Image: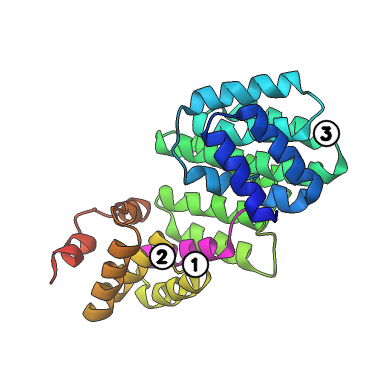
Amino acid sequence: MNGAERAARVAALRAAGRYSEAVDAAAAALADDSAEAWRRGLGYEERRRLPAGDPAAEWRAFDALRRRRPTEAAAHALAGLSAHAAGRWDEGRAAFARAGRLGPAHALWARAWGAKLRCWQAESFLGAGRTEAGLAAFADAVRASGGASWARAWAAQAELWCGRPERAEKALKAALKGAGDWSLGPRSWAVGWLALARLASGDARAAERSFAEALKGDPGDAEALAGAAEAAWRLGRRSPALALAKLLAETCPGSPWSGVIETLAGRDPVGAWARLRAAD
């Protein structure tokens, strides 16, 4: 069984409510290839694609399991991973911290996932209008990650939430320099956020180039598809814009990204994108 198959198995067991078996499967994945298992978040993305069930109940189950199996990194890791959907940020970070103390093979990855959980918490603060708390949480996440590029880029993206595209662009350029650490967040996302910052600043041509680069890294990125369509529309390239919008609709039906992009960039949602959708 390879890493992807192990991750899918852990995710399926979680979705089925077979939590103790999920811990056993996660432990096997960690024993086989600890770095690969942590990189995959023990099936985090696979779990997201399955029915959510009751996130609070799943968190409680894993929290109880980690207390009954205190020396098993897998139990603490799965508790930490389940904390996001349940909104149990602080408890989740404590679970990751415990996993990291159980051995050198887990320490760096557990710290990184704890930082990622802090980023999600920061986003929840921003979404609730708690701007200062959100930005402080992002700064904390960057420190906790050891200054990882993925965390710095995520924190820079928050400047778009706050209507400061110039600051976002500067921070994203800095995060994208060199090879960097993109272990828990793809570089293509940061390139897409840079494109959003440029679009929000009025430089549609530079934004279009950045969106194209982002789509090379992830052709199915709904945010980048939406942004590329808007950039093309602003440049008067109607046919490519409509083709990209059509691809977005086919690839990600019901995608909310057009509205999200308008919100991030501080513009009225009934602007350019409304005209784009109405065109034939």
Report the magenta residues as a range: 184-200
What label does residue 101 carry, if any? 3
- According to the picture, the residue beneath numbered tag 1 turns out to be 218
Query: Does the magenta portion include 199?
Result: yes
Task: Judge by depth and name the residue closer to the eye, 272 or 201.
Answer: 272
In this picture, residue 279 sits left or right of residue 183: left
Instruction: Name the chief secondary structure element in magenta.
Output: helix
- The amino acid type found where label 2 is placed reads Ala
Which mark is first along the chain, 1 or 3? 3
Q: What is the CA distance from the residue labelled 1 to the residue labelled 2? A: 9 Å
> In percent of the image, x 31 and y 69: which residue is there?
247
Horizontal and vertical percent for residue 27? 75, 38
The residues tagged by marks 3 and 1 sit, at their Cα atoms, a distance apart of 35 Å
Residue 230: image location, x then y, percent: 30, 68
Figure disc tally:
3
Q: Residue furthest right?
A: 104
- Residue for point 45% across, 35% down: 52
